[in-house]
Image (cartoon, grey):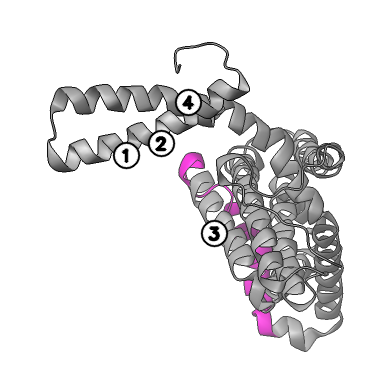
Amino acid sequence: MARSRRLTGAEADELTRLYQSTAADLAAVRSSAPDPTVVSRLSIALASARVWLTGGHESSTRSVRHFITRSLPAALYRVRWWGVIVSLSVVLGGAICAWWLLSNPDAMAMIGSPSEREAIASFEFANYYVEYDSGSFAAQVWTNNWFIAAQCIALGITGFYPLYLLFNTVLQLGVAAAVMAEAGYLGIFFQLISPHGLLELSAVFVAAGAGLRLFWTLLAPGGRPRGLALAQEGRTAFGVAIGLAVVLLISGLIEGFITGAAIPWSIKVGIGVIACAAFWMYVFVAGRAAVRESVDGDVDGDFATAKVAIAS
């Protein structure tokens, strides 16, 4: 029956009964008289029947393609506004921080002496992108940034860690911008940050947004049992973390091979703008298309969990 191309309903039921009976027989043979020939024959028969009963699995390439074109965009789309709000908040906060530092000489003095700040602006800030080998620098930047993004998601449920990270990012951006602006190098600051920073910071901010969404789910599960809601959002956030690893790899390659390269700044900045725009289009355009196809960003296939109706 397992070799048949088609089975009627009655035959399928009979195959199921025979499968269960043969599995019991195989267990008995293995425990009482494990004859290799009989065990091998029964195992092959059961394997053939199992294909009929359970169906074949999707190929790995199809699963990867589905994740890239459907599951990941849907997961990112679910946290899109969290990422946008975090991005705008940090950029605004960094600008306010830089303005406050430039308006308060005592605060600037805490960064360093005038000569130390001049050295940072005229040499150290730009030298950071060229003092190491491009390949090792890109790898180091990628692993560091993805570790930060993964921490944002994994520890996001605390509600504290993403905010702590974002506060530090505001300070770092504000201090760097203030030091460069004081020396008259604000244009160079944006030239050095834009090629990789637009994509890099977008990815980290989306990770922070995904982590904060987990914390919000803990507080307001939205009509779902709190445990179920956290499990669903946690699995979605895990998919986001995997996707952002690739995004941060791209930004790391740009930082390692493009930012410090001897090519026109217009090309460098253009690469950064295009990469950032492509990422957000992937989030909003591909994500919206996936959601319209009823993809929710949760795991599916062999890893999917059973879903039951919940009374509202």
Magenta region, residue range:
110-136
> 10 Å neighbourhood of mark 3: few (<14), some, or many (≥20)?
some
Residue occupied by mark 1? 24
> Type of residue at label 3?
Phe
> Type of residue at label 4?
Leu
> Type of residue at label 2?
Gln
**Residue 229: quarter of image:** bottom right
Residue 68 falls inside the magenta stretch: no
Residue 28 versus residue 123: which sits nearer the camera?
A: 28
> Type of residue at label 1?
Ala
Q: CA distance from mark 4 to mark 2?
A: 9 Å
Residue occupied by mark 4? 15
- Is the residue 210 above or below the residue 112 in the image? above
> 10 Å neighbourhood of mark 1: few (<14), some, or many (≥20)?
few
Q: CA distance from mark 2 to mark 1?
A: 6 Å
Residue contact at pointers 2 and 1, CB within 8 angstroms: yes
- Give the residue drawn at x 41%, y 31%: 19
Residue occupied by mark 2? 20
Secondary-structure class at tag 4? helix
Type of secondary structure dominating the magenta stretch: helix
- Give the residue drawn at x 72%, y 33%: 69
Image spot of residue 216 (x, y percent): 77, 73
Return the disc, 4 or 2, that comes first in the chain's sequence: 4
Give left or right: position of 136 versus 266: left
Q: CA distance from mark 1 to mark 3?
A: 49 Å
